[in-house]
Amino acid sequence: MEKITHKPVLKIGVLTFHRCINFGSYWQARCLAEGLQARGHEAEILDHESRRVNLAEWRCAFQPVLPTHVPESDRPLYRAKIRKFFPVFDTLPLSPKFELDNPAGMEDYDVVVVGSDEVWNLTHPWYGRCPLFYGDGVKAERLISYAASFGNYDASWGLEPFWADKLRNFDAISVRDENSQTIIQNALGFTPEMVLDPCLQFPITPEPRDLDILKEPYVAVYGHNFTESFAREIKKWAQKQNLRLLSIGYRNDWADEQWITADPHDFAHYMANAQAVATNFFHGCVFALRNAKPFVCESSPYRRHKLQGLMAKIGGEKHLLPEGTPTEVYQTLLSTPLDAEILQKIERLRQTSHKYLDRALRHKQLELA
C-alpha cells in the first residue's frame, strides 16, 4: 500500500437525519461528525432543510406513541421536548443550509459520508425515496457510506434498479445490519462491510448536567408501546430490587416516573447512570452497550432488522426477549453484569470500523498528498 508522507486535511460532509426529534438520531450524527474531526479532518453535518419534512417530523413528535392515544395533559410536555431539541441542534457542527430537494446550494466537499441511520429506507414516512441520500446532487469528489441502513425495508422486497444504480456511484459502502448487507449483496453483487453505529464507535460527550431526577437509583425505561408481559416482568424485577422505573422521552404509565421533556444531553446522562435498561428501541440497546449496563429488549416489526442485526453482530441475541419469556430470564439478564465477551466483540468491531474509515478516506488523501 502506498505510504502517505503527510496526511492532508479533508473537507468532509456528513449526510444523515440530524434534525429528528429523537435522541439516537442526534447522537449518531454528532458522534460521526466529531469522530471524523478527531481524525484531523474538517467535518460538518450537511444541513439540509425541508418544510415538508419538518412538518412531518413535528407532527410525529406531538403524537409519538401512536397507535396509543396521547392525552391532552401530555401535549405541553411533548411541545416542551420538541422545543428543547432546537437549540441543541444549533450546537452541531453544521454546514450552511440548503434545500433537501434541491441541493444546488450545497458546498463542495472532498468527501461526503452518507450515514448512519435509515438513510436508504425507501419506506421511511418522510425521508423515503429522497434521491439526495442515494448520492444525487451531492457535491463531493468521493462518496462513501458509514453504517448506513435500510431500516425496516426488507431484503426480500429487492432493490429497484433505479436505486441500485445510484448506489453504484459510491466509492465505498458500509452498513450497520445484516438486512442492509443482504440488500447490497443482492443488488450490487458484493458484500459491504459491517461497521458499528457511531454511538458505539466514537466517544459520547454530553454537556455537564446536575440532574436531581437521576440522583436516586433507577431502571431506565426507553421506548413505548411495550407489551403487557414485558412491562409486568420489568416491574416485578424492579420492585424486588427496590428500584424505581424512570421512563424518558415517552409516557409509559407502568413506570414510576415520566421524564418526557428531556433533551439529548439529559438522555446521555440518564443512560450512563441507570442501574439497568429496559427498551424496545435500537439506541436504547446501543446506549446500554455503550455504558456496559445490564439490559433487556423486546422487538417490534418496525425495528426488527435493526435490533436483530445489532444483537447478531455483538453476540447479544439473548437480550432480545420474545413475548412469553420466563421470569427467570428477565431477572438473570437484569441482575448480571454485561458479558465481557460482548464488550470484547464491540472492541474488535470498533477496530475494523476504524480500518474501514481509514481505507475509505485514504484514497482521497493519496490524491491530495
Image: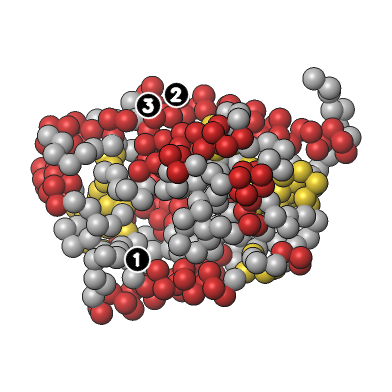
Secondary structure under badge 1? loop
Q: Position of residue 283 (x, y in %)?
A: 41, 47
Secondary structure under badge 2? helix
Nearest the eye: 181 or 4? 181
**What residue is shown with label 1?**
64
Q: Please tell me the numbered disc located at residue 260.
A: none
Mark pair 2, 3: CA separation: 10 Å
What residue lies at 80% left-to-right and 20% top-to-bottom?
1
Nearest the eye: 313 or 328? 313
Q: Is residue 291 left or right of residue 119?
A: left
Q: Position of residue 109 (x, y in %)?
A: 78, 52
Nearest the eye: 13 or 193? 193
**What residue is shown with label 2?**
344
What residue lies at 45% left-to-right and 52% top-to-bottom?
24
Mark pair 1, 2: CA separation: 35 Å
> Residue 365 sits in which quadrant?
top right
Q: Please tell me the numbered disc located at residue 315.
A: 3
Q: Position of residue 62 (x, y in %)?
A: 37, 73
Residue type at mark 1?
Pro
Would you place residue 46 above or below residue 286 in this image?
Answer: below
Q: Tell which circle, 1 or 3, labels the residue nearer the N-terminal end.
A: 1
Mark pair 1, 3: CA separation: 31 Å
Query: Which of label 1 and label 2 is nearer to you?
Result: 1
Instruction: Inspect this view and state whether residue 241 appears.
Output: no
Q: Residues within 10 Å of mark 2 (few under 14, many from 20)?
A: few
Residue type at mark 2?
Gln
Q: Position of residue 137 (x, y in %)?
A: 73, 58
Q: Tell which circle, 1 or 2, labels the residue nearer the N-terminal end.
A: 1
